[in-house]
Image (tube, rainbow, N blue to C red):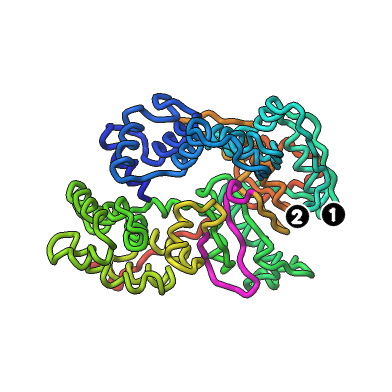
Amino acid sequence: QEALSLAEEACAAANYTGSPLRLLEGVSRIKNGAAAPDTPGGGPAAAYDAYCRLQRRFGARDYDDLLLDVLHRMEEGGRSPVAFSHLLVDEFQDINDLQYRLIRAWSRGGESLFVIGDPDQSIYGFRGADADCFARLLGQKPDAQVMRLTRNYRSTPQILAAALQAISANPGGQRELCAARPDGEAVRALLAPDAFSEGVFIAKEIGRMTGGMDMLAAHGGGVRETARAFAEIAVLCRTRRQLETIEACLRHDDIPCVIAGRGDFLQDDAVRAAQAFFASLLEKDAAAFSLVLRLGYDCPAEEAEAAARAYAEAPSPLAFAQDAGDLGTTALWARDARDFVPRAEKEKPRKLLEGWCAAHGKNPALEKLLAAAAFAQDMSSFLNLLATGEEADIRRAAGKSYASGAVRLMTLHGAKGLEFPVVFLAGVSEGALPLEREDEPCDVEEERRLFFVGLTRAREELILTAAGAYSPFVQELPGDVRRASIPARLRAPAAEQLSLFDEL
């Protein structure tokens, strides 16, 4: 959140019309060597320079800076070239150029370098990852030994056949994967007229799989002999926005679900203020302190920055709060700080945030933050999770809680590395996968790899659903995929409040 705040200030200072999030993405690409400051993907040089100046002013470092610092010490700092005798790198296909150079520097002079990965699962091109990293390494180490793992212990032959057919359209030659599991159910592909009908189908089908959550499911026929647990099922989509309709349909049918990923609620100003307040208490973070003064207490930017400089020199947040006086927005922060400091390291994050909401109000975004906080044990780890956690690490609950767990909802990026007995690969529609955007070129090969990752998350059952028209990737699947249609469903009309009196 502090980085986003600095990006907002940098955008204003440089008259940059792009979003702060886009600037942050561009800054990361520049620091990783994937873009120049004046390229469209990197943002104008003025905005980049303004962001770096603000970082220096607050003494802030981001993750890319830490990698650059280490690489500089290894390559130019006069350190011994031998960093590790043996170096093991997992998920090698996800590294960018900066990380590749760091791995080479760490392994220089060592006895062995062992990298593990799958170029067909390289799906982070927007972070600078390159599926050709294996070929690059072999070019620099031509004597390297290559071991290929071809036996798959996760998916049924039917799922694996669909996945291999999908990825075969990408360069790379013939893939060799042999399923160790016995035959299972056929892969299904179902086409709905619209996203709402698709969401209703998914909810009803999960109800059928789990034995029925309502009278219609329980008595409408088609209930399985062996019911699935909710926790055995995952619904995966290309984007978080696609998950919103499905979440609403699951909640309507009282199906418990857990949504994983960095939802848009984290960019809400009220959520950022709450996070910054507790970061200012627990981490003595001057940037967080300035941010909460502006967003949580309506403090003017110049006054907040001046207060942040004084805060940074104080021995502790509590000491600063005790000396803050009784006037101005800093005094309002100090009042809350004196209340929360004794509790911040003892109470659960959800309880602390409920206290913040009681004093400052609540909105739907804060409700989602509270739902995410329920999974954390302490506020420090929760703040760290929000700052550095991967997509699958950040979760929030929706719907009721049942002993059999909850259905998992997440994006395809967030699902990487995970597996589930049953996977609904939803929203595999034309325009959504591969994802088409007006302002960005589409890397069809990477989108196909993302599709491959989604298919291979399933162990026993795989159901693909689409709205309107199938993705071209679905058209490439083998002929034994069972295809069917989903009937149209109409949304219930919004209820109208009737007048108690007739008009005269």
Helix, strand or loop at mark 2: strand
Q: Would residue 73 be counted in the magenta stretch?
A: no
- Boundaries of the magenta span: 395-416
In primary-sequence order, the first of circles 2 and 1 is 1
Q: Is residue 23 visible?
A: yes
On screen, residue 390 above or below 43: below
Residue labelled with disc 2: 459
Q: Are marks 2 and 1 in contact (CB under 8 Å)?
A: yes
Residue 387 in the image: x percent, y percent? 44, 52
Distance between the alpha carbons at the discs numbered 2 and 1: 9 Å
- Quadrant where the image shows the C terminus: bottom left
Classify residue 219 by image quadrant.
bottom right
What's under tag 2, amino acid-wise? Arg
**Measured from the top left, where is residue 235 in percent x and y?**
62, 55
Disc 1 element: loop
Viewed as shown, does residue 199 lie left or right of 454?
left
What amino acid is labelled 1 in the image?
Arg
Relative vertical location of residue 247 with respect to residue 478 in this rendering, above or below: below
Query: Which disc is residue 181 wearing?
Result: 1
Is residue 430 visible to the viewer in this orientation of the structure?
no
